[in-house]
Structures are given as C-alpha cells and as structure tokens.
Amino acid sequence: MPSPATVDQTAALPMPLTFQEFQQRRRSSSPQERPVEDIGWSDKVAVWITARVGTIGFFLLILVWTLLWLGWNFLAPKDLQFDPPMGFVFWLFISNVIQILIMPLIMVGQNVLGRHAERRAENDLEVNVKAEEEIEVILHHLEYQNSILLALLRTQSDKQE
C-alpha cells in the first residue's frame, strides 16, 4: 500500500489529456480555412517581370545593349550612325521608357510577393503554435509519468524498510 504522501503527490497532479481529447481540442481550435488568393493575369505578369529583371542575365542584356549602342554610334562611319555621339538622345529616350515601364511593374510584383510571404509567415506561426501545444501535452504526460514512477519507487523503498 502506498504511503499517504505518495498518494497525495500523484493526486496533486491533474490527469493529463488523452490523445482523443487532445485531438478534439485541436480540431476545435484550428484556424478557419483562408481562401487562397487567386491573383490576376496582371499580377502574374508583374511577378514574372520582377523575377526576370532582378537577375544577372537581365543586367548583362542591358549592359550589352548599351555597349553595342554606344560603341556603334562612337565607332561606326558618320553616315551609319543613327544617334550622334555625346548627345545620345534616342538612347536616353529608350532607356527612360524602359525604366518608366519596369519600375511600377517591379513594385506591383514585390507587393504580390510580399503578400504571399506574409501569408506563409502566418501559416508558419500557426504551425508553431500547434506544435507548442502538442509539446505542452507531451511534457504534461512526462511529468505525470515521472510522478507515478517516483511514487512507485517510494512505495518500494517503504516496503523494503
């Protein structure tokens, strides 16, 4: 027969949740399903351009285009030059048009990617909170089992004395 102190110690700890109780509680506290945001074709184009413009390939393309343009208009015979050197008005015009068109697209693409990253971070937080709850239940079970084992050890040591 266990000693009264041993019985009091195990009785002081509340009984841990069963696995079924934990599953029911977990299902009831699960977040509501959020509809997946279906982005439109314009957002898809903006994301595609954002992904391509931010590459070394795009940089090299612009660099080669600029070097060819400037090199041709510096080194070609005067009758074949189409943008007179030192002015490069046409080159500046095309460069500015490219910049004006790409900058807003990049901003839209970054906004779409940012929304996606926020949604992913929220899902990660939900997973972490659920994992923390599961760990708490496991720790509670371990603590309860530890108290039972200690009570059994004390009971056996009381019997041996």
Image: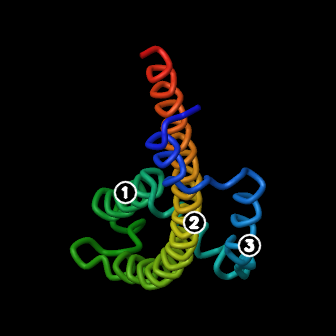
Looking at the image, is 159 positioned above or below residue 39? above
User: Residue type at mark 1?
Assistant: Leu
Give the mark, 1 or 2, whose residue is nearer the N terminus.
1
| Numbered circle sitting on residue 42 | none
Which residue extends farthest top? 160
Residue contact between numbered discs 2 and 3, judged by CB atoms under 8 Å:
no
Q: Residue at 70% x, 79% y: name it.
A: 37
Return the residue at label 1: 63
Dot 3, how many residues are within 10 Å of its Cα: few (below 14), some (14-19), or many (20+)?
Answer: few
Q: Which residue does the numbered mark 3 point to in the structure image?
A: 28
Dividing the image into 4 quarters, which one contains the C terminus?
A: top left
> Mark 3 and mark 1: span between their CA atoms?
58 Å
Indicate which disc residue 126 carries.
Answer: 2
Q: Looking at the image, is mark 2 or mark 3 nearer the viewer? A: 3
Kind of residue at badge 2: Glu
Q: Is residue 36 above or below residue 147?
A: below
Q: Where in the figure is residue 60, as x and y percent of width and height?
A: 41, 52
Where in the figure is residue 11, as x and y percent of width and height?
54, 51
Q: Residue at x 54, y 44 (%)?
A: 144
Give percent across and percent down for residue 40.
72, 82
Q: How is the image coloured?
A: rainbow
- Which mark is nearer the camera, 3 or 1? 3
Q: Residue at x 51, y 53 (%)?
A: 13
Q: Which residue is at the front of the view, 148 or 119?
A: 148
First reached walking from the N terminus: tag 3 or tag 1: 3
**Pointer 2 or 3: first along the chain:** 3
SS of the residue at dot 3?
Answer: helix
Is disc 2 surrounded by few (<14), some (14 to 19) or many (20+) residues within 10 Å?
Answer: some
Residue 30: percent from left, percent from top? 69, 70
Alpha-carbon distance for marks 2 and 3?
Answer: 14 Å
Callout 3 amino acid: Ser
Residue in the picture at 48% in, 43% down = 4
